[in-house]
Image (spheres, rainbow, N blue to C red):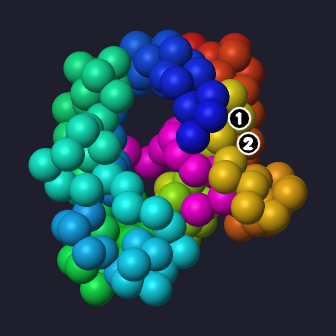
Amino acid sequence: MPGADAIVPPLRELASHLSELVATRDFHPPGHCSFTAQGGPWPPHCVIATPGAALHPDIDAIAYVIVSKGTDPALEQYSGFDGTGLGDLLRARGVRRVIIGGLATDYCVRATALAACREGFATTVVLDAVRAVDLKPGDGDRALDAIRSAGGRVCTQAEILRASPE
Ligand code: ZN
């Protein structure tokens, strides 16, 4: 996605102030149901054992847990909580608040943030650490509205650190 690399510095800055960092990733087998050749909406992406499935090296270097999703060829899993055990993993570590950045605002970020709200976590999406696909113009903004409507917050990295430096 154009501009995607720009989300890395704010994520790293935030991560240096937080106790836990989980990276979620699409990790698709070849022929995943979301690919156009299988009738899905997306070109092939994040295919296991290809460079496309790798985390950004600056994220890979700091993530202590990596949660893979979309590994079943027949299942789309936009949310990092969908069938991954992430909610239980976070609760087991005493996490009550999650701060989310990533790609893309209107798909995986949206689904992950809405799931985090449903799971009872105080949820914040980092405005300068997300980018939207915007297949339809405004999709990203509508996704952020949906997250706010579900009780989530949308703030810049600087606002989050000003509000709670620890
Ligand atoms: Zn995918």
Which x, y percent locates residue 71?
22, 68
Which x, y percent locates residue 117?
57, 63
Judging from the image, what secondary structure is the residue with disc 2 in?
strand
Which x, y percent locates residue 63?
26, 30
The image quadrant that residue 15 belongs to is top left
Indicate the amino acid at tag 2. Val
Residue lying at 25% horizontally and 56% vertically, measured from the top left: 47
Residue lying at 34% horizontally and 28% vertically, measured from the top left: 56
Q: CA distance from mark 2 to mark 1?
A: 6 Å
From the viewer's perspective, is residue 141 above or below residue 70? above
Q: Label 1 neighbourhood size at 10 Å, few (<14), some (14-19), many (20+)?
A: many
Residue lying at 32% horizontally and 52% vertically, measured from the top left: 46
**Image quarter in which the N terminus is found:** top right
Q: Nearer the viewer, residue 126 or 91?
A: 126
Q: Nearer the viewer, residue 23 or 118?
A: 23
From the viewer's perspective, is residue 118 above or below residue 45? below
Judging from the image, what secondary structure is the residue with disc 1 in?
strand
From the viewer's perspective, is residue 36 above or below residue 9? below
Q: Check disc 1 and report the residue beneath it.
A: 127
- Closer to the eye: label 2 or 1: 1
Residue lying at 30% horizontally and 68% vertically, measured from the top left: 70
Residue 94 visible in the picture: no
Indicate the amino acid at tag 1. Leu
Region in magenta: 92-107
**Under 8 Å from ligand 1: the CB of mark 2?**
no
Q: Check disc 2 and report the residue beneath it.
A: 154
Which mark sits nearer the N-terminus, 2 or 1? 1
The residue most toward the right is: 138
Q: Nearer the viewer, residue 2 or 10?
A: 2
Q: Is residue 43 left or right of residue 141?
A: left
